[in-house]
Image: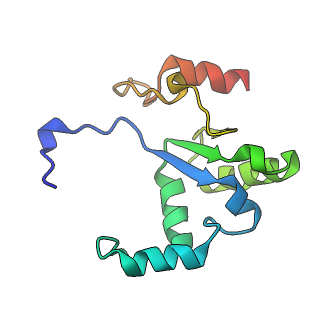
Amino acid sequence: PLIFRTKLFVNGLITMVDSEALSSGYPVSDVAALEKQREDDESIDHLTPIKELYENQLQVADLVLLSRADTVSKESLQTIKLETLKRVREGTPVLSIANGFIDPGVIECSPPKTNGNFFSDSILSFISDN
């Protein structure tokens, strides 16, 4: 669809990562199902390998959410978080989501502030508390 540049402003980029899949060593849990979806849907036309796409998304993220954190052990989640922090830009928050829930205030975006922070004070408070 046509996007009018004057109507769109990206406040920040949030990347969601599947903790359960990563605990098995790959960003996607069912590679065969993903490949079948790509074959069956002509609108999915990117040729970038999933691992490379995953790395690229982490590098541009302003916030990373580790989904399905409740499905992995605390030790595994800690390892995933540490490995993710190595792949994101310095200062990028990496937060865990359990049972599919995150407080909407945590991901609320605001217009960029002079310090370059895109996220609301509630996320900054949440991060500093955790």
In percent of width and height, residue 3 lies at 15, 49
Residue 9 placement: quadrant: top left
Q: Which of these two is toward me, 113 or 100?
A: 100
In percent of width and height, residue 5 lies at 15, 44
Relative placement, left or right, of 55 versus 37 is right
Residue 48 visible in rendering? no
Q: Residue at coordinates 51% horizontally, 26% vertically from top-left?
A: 104
Relative placement, left or right, of 12 versus 54 is left
In percent of width and height, residue 29 lies at 65, 67
The image shows residue 102, relative to residue 47, as above or below, that is above
The colouring scheme, among rainbow, by chain, secondary structure or one colour, is rainbow
Q: How many marks?
A: 0
Residue 28 placement: quadrant: bottom right
Residue 65 visible in rendering? yes
Relative placement, left or right, of 31 versus 7 is right
The image shows residue 41, relative to residue 81, as above or below, that is below
Q: Which of these two is toward me, 6 or 31?
A: 31
Q: Residue at coordinates 47% horizontally, 22% vertically from top-left?
A: 120
Q: Quadrant of the N terminus?
A: bottom left
Q: Residue at coordinates 67% horizontally, 69% vertically from top-left?
A: 26
In percent of width and height, residue 47 lies at 39, 79
Q: Quadrant of the C terminus?
A: top right
Relative placement, left or right, of 76 versus 119 is right
